[in-house]
Amino acid sequence: MKYTVVYKPLAEFQLADIWLRFADKQAVTEASDAIERLLRQNADQIGEPDERGWRILAEPPLVVTFDVSVDDRRATVHSVRLRP
């Protein structure tokens, strides 16, 4: 079953800021597209849990934190950052 992927306003801002500042914009675009595709397909089965109960998914050069509502079939992205 598919999930709807929703970005919190902060996550949208972070992604846009990374895209503007990062030299390899194509890499950011491809990573963002891959993350969204993975979350749509099986958000409840990917990533690693963090201390808040959210999940972390890395798709270089990006890392996102997200949570999943299985009942609503919704993945909410809370933050986007560059992978250290």
Image (cartoon, rainbow, N blue to C red):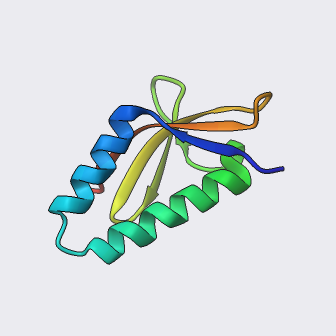
Residue 70 position, x and y percent, is: 76, 32
- In this view, the residue in front, 83 or 14, is 14
Query: Which residue is at a point 84% across and 50% down the rendered structure image?
Result: 1
- In this view, the residue in front, 48 or 5, is 5
Q: Which residue lies furthest to the right in this view?
A: 1
Instruction: Locate residue 67: give its quadrant.
Output: top right
Vertical side of 14 occupied by 40: above or below: below
Q: How many marks?
A: 0
- Relative horizontal placement of residue 27, taking residue 65 as reference (left or right): left
Query: Which residue is at a point 17% across and 72% down the rendered structure image?
Result: 23
Query: Which residue is at a point 54% across and 44% down the rendered structure image?
Result: 48
Residue 52 position, x and y percent, is: 47, 23
Quadrant assignment for the C terminus: bottom left
Residue 9 position, x and y percent, is: 38, 33
Vertical side of 62 occupied by 47: above or below: above
- Relative horizontal placement of residue 34, taking residue 82 as reference (left or right): right
Q: Residue furthest top?
A: 52
Residue 82 position, x and y percent, is: 27, 55
Query: Which residue is at a point 62% across and 51% down the rendered structure image?
Result: 39
- Relative horizontal placement of residue 24, taking residue 59 as reference (left or right): left
Vertical side of 15 occupied by 13: above or below: above
